[in-house]
Image (spheres, helix red, strand yellow):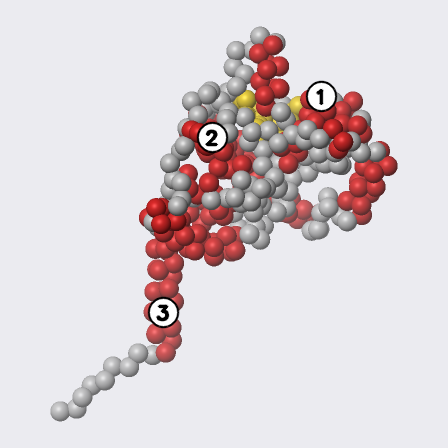
Amino acid sequence: MDHVYTHLHPSHFLWIVLATALALLIALSALPDDRYLRFKSLTEPEVVKAGWIYERIHFDPTPIDVVFIGTSRTVAGIDSEIVEQTCRDAGGKYCNSVNFGMLHLGRNVHWLLAREVIRTRMPRLLVVEVQETEFRALHPAFPFLADPADIVSAPLVINTSFLPDLGRLPTRQISLFAENLARSLFGTQTKFVPNHYRGSHWDDIDKDQSSVVSVAELERERAYLASAGIAKTRLPAPLQRLEYRANLLYLQQLLNLARERSIEIRFLYIPAFHNTATPIFSNFYNKFAPSWRMPEEIVNRHELWRDVDHLNYAGANAL
């Protein structure tokens, strides 16, 4: 009797290998993790504040009435304790304020932080920083903080971070899952410890009074940034909006969520030194809420700035 041999075609074998690898990656990406541990996993100085933000939202019973969301300009320019006390001195009833500004640009992280506080604490006012224009790049902390579903569903156009973020997801989940599983072995702190908590305010305003710089230095920095093309668009005019599409989508999601929960929104325009131009996307902002502008007497006074983009301690007090 003839023996019958079944041969697997190489292309079929390749498809099976690819399908198996894809299924394994999906399974690894879906591994459960501790969200607190995820936020605490960022230890670099630029983003370490994320762990405190999670603690302030979830473990600190102090009310959260006013939330500032933004970049390093909000970090340097907003002293939430001064805002809170000024509100109380003026007879305000709901004054508890937090500065959730984080270094780096990117509306995807702004959306994540706003969603976290809105879903958990229901603040009364959300103050969103705007600048002269929106950003092209998304925030580098997003793939470390976001839920897996957030990473998979991120916008594709134009988002140069999508594939790197997606590729990092399985490794991230394996690491967080293993660390949570073997917390005693790794010495990882996964429970909130009140004694380690830094308190209800985290403001990184520059208290170094020697940070005042001259007008000449500030103007040189402005000229350098202009010549470097920091604010110049790179696509033809009909396609320019695509440069900012991903960030604008995240900003719109943030604003829509606040609206759904009946949370007041204000935009806070924090321009660079000596810049009184109207933001490029002001028409977009106006669809959602009024904007607050930094007074020109602050914008134009060099002694209130530590560099062309950031207020110093006196500037934060003045603002």
Residue depth check, mark 2 versus mark 3: number of the one nearer the observer: 2
Looking at the rendered structure, the secondary structure element under dot 1 is helix
| Amino acid type, mark 3 | Val
Question: How packed is label 2: few (under 14 Cα within 10 Å), some, or many (20 or more)?
Answer: some
Most extreme residue toward the bottom is 1
Residue 160: give x, y in percent of width and height: 58, 53
User: What whole-number distance in Å separates the C-alpha atoms at marks 3 and 1?
Assistant: 63 Å
**Image point (36%, 55%), residue name:** 28
| Amino acid type, mark 1 | Ala
Which of the two labelled residues, at mark 3 and mark 1, occupies the earlier sequence position? 3
The residue where tag 2 is placed is: 197
Q: Is residue 80 left or right of residue 61?
A: right
Question: How packed is label 3: few (under 14 Cα within 10 Å), some, or many (20 or more)?
Answer: few
Given residues 238 and 200, the one toward you in this image is 200
Residue 156: give x, y in percent of width and height: 53, 51
Q: Is residue 138 above or below residue 311?
A: below
The residue where tag 3 is placed is: 17
User: What whole-number distance in Å separates the C-alpha atoms at marks 2 and 3?
Assistant: 48 Å
Residue depth check, mark 3 versus mark 1: number of the one nearer the observer: 1
**Image point (60%, 10%), residue name:** 89
Given residues 274 and 44, the one toward you in this image is 44
Looking at the rendered structure, the secondary structure element under dot 2 is loop
| Amino acid type, mark 2 | Tyr
Res. 142 mark:
none
**Image point (54%, 26%), residue name:** 201
Residue 62: give x, y in percent of width and height: 46, 21
Most extreme residue toward the left is 1
Q: Is residue 35 left or right of residue 302?
A: left
Given residues 42 and 5, the one toward you in this image is 42
The residue where tag 1 is placed is: 318
Residue depth check, mark 1 versus mark 2: number of the one nearer the observer: 2
Residue 177 showing in the rendered view: no
